[in-house]
Image (cartoon, rainbow, N blue to C red):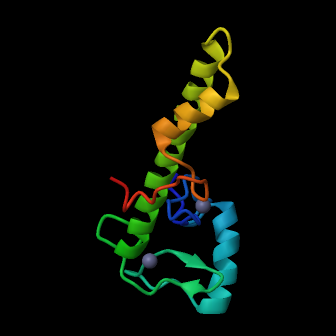
Amino acid sequence: MPQCLGIKATFERCHSNAIEGGIHCRMHARHQARYDERFGPHVPGLCHFVNATGRCELEHEANELICMHHRHARERNVARRQEQERDEQEIEETYEQYMAVIPRPQWQNVIDELINRAGFPRAFPGYLRPDIAR
Ligand SMILES: [Zn+2]
Ligand SMILES: [Zn+2]
């Protein structure tokens, strides 16, 4: 079965199969019917991204269903998600390191060390803006 041509809000392509004889999965077919009614049908060659404000009117890239602008937005989303996952993993590891220390470190030591690692948090006395620090 062919893959649905729907584009998700994250600008990624829908991974579901298209319904029999159609080009979209059940959910996107339902959405597309409403968009067709409001904005007219999708014009071949143009970006497949559509939301409540209308269809994207830029041409899609040769090997994509979406335009360059929306591909960049998708790539930024992916990078942001990876950065967030890295941060979460680092927090988890730091937490485990502290929990492994016997006796447990005092809160003041923990704060001192976190400040050493990351600098003062914003709005904390002693905070240095990273762009003017050093
Ligand atoms: Zn779909
Ligand atoms: Zn677009």
Task: Tally the marks.
Answer: 0
Residue at the (44%, 67%) spot, across then down: 73
- Which of the 4 quarters of the picture holds residue 89? top right
The spot of residue 134 in percent (x, y) is 32, 52
Asked if one can make out residue 20 in the rendered structure from this viewpoint, the answer is no
Residue placed furthest toward the top:
102
77 or 49: which is nearer to us? 77
Residue placed furthest toward the left:
62
The spot of residue 130 in percent (x, y) is 41, 57
70 is higher (above) or lower (below) than 52: above
Asked if one can make out residue 52 in the rendered structure from this viewpoint, the answer is yes
Residue at the (61%, 29%) spot, across then down: 110
Residue at the (53%, 48%) spot, across then down: 120
- Which of the 4 quarters of the picture holds residue 67? bottom left
21 is higher (above) or lower (below) than 120: below
The spot of residue 112 in percent (x, y) is 56, 34
50 or 85: which is nearer to us? 85
131 is higher (above) or lower (below) than 32: above
Residue at the (41%, 81%) spot, across then down: 46
Residue placed furthest toward the front:
126
Position of 75 with respect to 8 (left or right) is: left
126 is higher (above) or lower (below) than 108: below
The spot of residue 7 in percent (x, y) is 53, 66
25 or 73: which is nearer to us? 73
Ligand 1's quadrant is bottom right
